[in-house]
């Protein structure tokens, strides 16, 4: 067993854990290179959940773009359902982002309106939201 000290690639905190690296070294894995790419549990959980929610939001936005391109008479029902789903997903996203950056929940319906108006730009809207929360002044 060897104690491995690393710096989280996201939050830059220094952490350590014990691990037996002999098996990895026997397989030719460069342990020092691997250590440079790991993150702490808090950051790993946040980025995993963010990625999953971004993918789900993207699927709703893709379905919305597809429905708008067709000649569906029920487009208003579909848009209403898409708005509800996006509201749910963006509230979940706001929850994990605000928990990660340690803020009270910051969510506005304008977020959903942006996604409904420009579904092809969903990734940009999410990144802007996250950067906005991250840059909020701490009390």
Image (tube, rainbow, N blue to C red):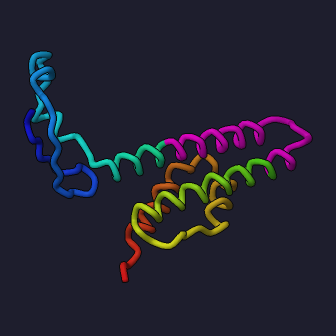
Residue 36 x %, y %: 16, 41
Looking at this view, is 14 or 132 the one in front? 14
**Residue at x 9%, y 41% (from the top left corner):** 3
| Image position of 112 (left or right of 24) | right
From the viewer's perspective, is residue 138 above or below residue 41?
below
Q: Is residue 76 magenta?
A: yes
**Magenta region:** 52-79
Residue 99 x %, y %: 45, 63
Q: How many marks on residues? A: 0
Residue at the limit of the structure toward the front, as seen here: 1
Does the magenta stretch mainly form a helix, a strand or a loop?
A: helix
**Residue at x 67%, y 54% (from the top left corner):** 88
**Residue at x 14%, y 16% (from the top left corner):** 27
| Image position of 95 (left or right of 87) | left
Looking at this view, is 3 or 99 the one in front? 3
Question: In which quadrant of the rendered image does the N terminus lie?
Answer: top left
Residue at the limit of the structure toward the right, as seen here: 73
Residue 69 x %, y %: 76, 38
Residue 47 x %, y %: 40, 47
């Amino acid at each position: 067993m060897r104690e491995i000290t690393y710096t989280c690639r996201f939050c830059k905190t220094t952490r350590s854990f014990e691990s037996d690296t002999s098996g990895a070294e026997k397989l030719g894995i460069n342990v020092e290179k691997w250590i440079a790419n790991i993150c702490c549990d808090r950051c790993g959980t946040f980025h995993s959940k963010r990625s999953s929610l971004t993918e789900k939001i993207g699927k709703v936005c893709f379905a919305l773009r597809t429905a708008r391109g067709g000649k569906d008479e029920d487009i208003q029902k579909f848009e209403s359902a898409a708005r509800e789903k996006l509201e749910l997903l963006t509230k979940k996203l706001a929850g994990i982002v605000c928990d990660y950056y340690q803020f009270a929940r910051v969510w506005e319906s304008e977020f959903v309106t942006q996604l409904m108006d420009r579904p092809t730009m969903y990734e940009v809207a999410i990144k802007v939201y996250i950067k906005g929360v991250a840059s909020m002044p701490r009390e």
